[in-house]
Image (cartoon, rainbow, N blue to C red):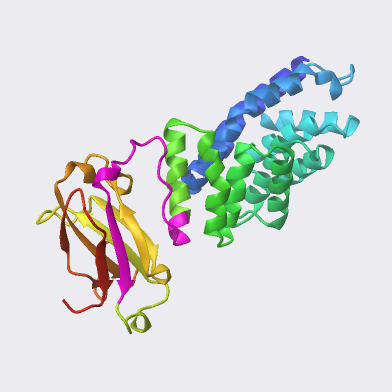
């Protein structure tokens, strides 16, 4: 038992230093998944150390490994005697990853996944190992299949859902990634939730979808909402690129250009009706409901950027007293 305790401790410490630090430097967007991975590490080591007899016969010399190479050698020897132990292959995969033998780590995790085809944790780690072994750090079709199997076995598995969304975004499917990540918002809290919501909304923005609002944010004041009916003037659409975006903006009259409420929509959605309220505020400290008047305008952004650029097309700002008594009608491209 002493051998496996020592191996587990050595591997656990060196995985932290050898795997997560390079990821932090090179793949920060994946750190959410890696931190969630680390959270279950203690459980893995306990399960292995708690039943060392599953791998080690009585003939094993109970000499603690002095370094990671010795730990790997002892694991390999134990697995030659007992090759059908998924936990042993899993720990070997982690040790090899810490030594940056990423291809061998991938093979070890693949063996663990083969032996434990319904273990969501092992399947997810096997998918991650494939990603780390890939020169471009991408999740390939086999990795996606592993993640899908993990979610079939455990639909609420956080890391599997996160990495599947990463794979979808890498594949140019931002809407699918946002849909995959959205259920995680109900499972995490605090800064993790805020970071995840940011990633979801970045994916939704890439897919030209409106952002999700934070359900933990203060409720919007519907009495001070502004309904805007927006359309294009005849013949304008042909002169604009199909992938242009439309920003509907409310701002302080005569004040700075920073909006107090804004929504972004694809040009193809016009004509449309939107309602601007406190939930659309980019700055929680400046809310629409605190104002007695606003200027409302719409702008077609050819580049898709929030900041106005040459070539953009805007309506004249229209001053509205709050609470508004009727919808504001704006026509982009109409002469004043």
Instruction: Examine the structure image and report whether residue 225 is included in the region drawn in magenta.
Output: yes
Residue 125: x and y in percent read 68, 40
The part of the chain drawn in magenta is 204-232
230 lies above or below 147:
below
Residue 65 appears anywhere in the view: no
Q: Nearer the viewer, residue 31 or 198?
A: 198
239 lies above or below 207:
below
Instruction: Examine the structure image and report whether residue 246 is included in the region drawn in magenta.
Output: no
Residue 229: x and y in percent read 31, 64
The residue that appears at 47% across and 31% down in the rendered structure is 189
Q: Nearer the viewer, residue 34 or 319?
A: 319
The residue that appears at 64% across and 37% down in the rendered structure is 157
220 lies above or below 206:
above
Q: Quadrant of the C terminus?
A: bottom left
Left or right side of 125 for 249? left
The residue that appears at 80% across and 33% down in the rendered structure is 86
Numbered-mark total: 0
245 lies above or below 289:
below
Quarter of the figure with residue 14: top right
Q: Nearer the viewer, residue 206 or 58?
A: 206
Q: Nearer the viewer, residue 164 or 237?
A: 237
Residue ranking furthest to the front:
325
Quarter of the figure with residue 13: top right
Left or right side of 122 for 304? left
The residue that appears at 42% across and 46% down in the rendered structure is 198
Residue 37 appears anywhere in the view: yes
Residue ranking furthest to the left:
254
Residue 182: x and y in percent read 53, 45
């Amino acid at each position: 038992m002493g051998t496996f305790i020592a191996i587990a401790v050595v591997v656990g410490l060196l995985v932290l230093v050898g795997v997560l630090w390079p990821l932090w430097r090179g793949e920060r967007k994946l750190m959410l998944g890696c931190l969630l991975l680390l959270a279950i590490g203690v459980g893995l080591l306990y399960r292995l150390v708690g039943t060392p007899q599953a791998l080690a016969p009585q003939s094993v010399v109970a000499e603690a490994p002095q370094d990671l190479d010795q730990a790997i050698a002892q694991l390999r020897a134990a697995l030659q005697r007992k090759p059908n132990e998924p936990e042993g292959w899993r720990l070997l995969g982690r040790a090899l990853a810490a030594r940056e033998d990423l291809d061998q780590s991938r093979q070890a995790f693949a063996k663990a996944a083969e032996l434990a085809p319904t273990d969501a944790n092992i399947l997810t780690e096997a998918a991650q190992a494939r990603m780390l072994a890939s020169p471009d750090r991408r999740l390939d079709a086999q990795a996606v299949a592993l993640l899908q199997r993990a979610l079939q076995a455990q639909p609420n598995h956080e890391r599997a859902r996160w990495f599947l969304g990463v794979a979808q975004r890498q594949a140019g499917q931002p809407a699918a990634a946002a849909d995959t990540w959205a259920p995680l918002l109900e499972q995490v809290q605090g800064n993790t939730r805020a970071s995840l919501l940011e990633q979801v909304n970045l994916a939704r923005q890439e897919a030209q979808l409106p952002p999700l609002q934070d359900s933990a944010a203060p409720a919007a004041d519907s009495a001070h909402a502004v309904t805007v009916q927006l359309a294009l003037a005849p013949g304008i659409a042909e002169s604009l690129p199909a992938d242009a975006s439309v920003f509907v903006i409310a701002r302080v009259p005569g004040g700075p250009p920073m909006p107090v409420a804004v929504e972004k929509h694809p040009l193809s959605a016009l004509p449309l009706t939107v309602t601007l309220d406190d939930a659309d505020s980019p700055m929680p400290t400046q809310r629409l409901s605190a104002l007695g008047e606003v200027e409302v305008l719409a702008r077609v952004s050819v580049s898709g950027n929030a900041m106005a650029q040459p070539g953009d097309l805007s309506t004249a700002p229209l001053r509205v007293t709050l609470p508004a008594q009727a919808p504001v009608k704006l026509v982009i491209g109409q002469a004043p």
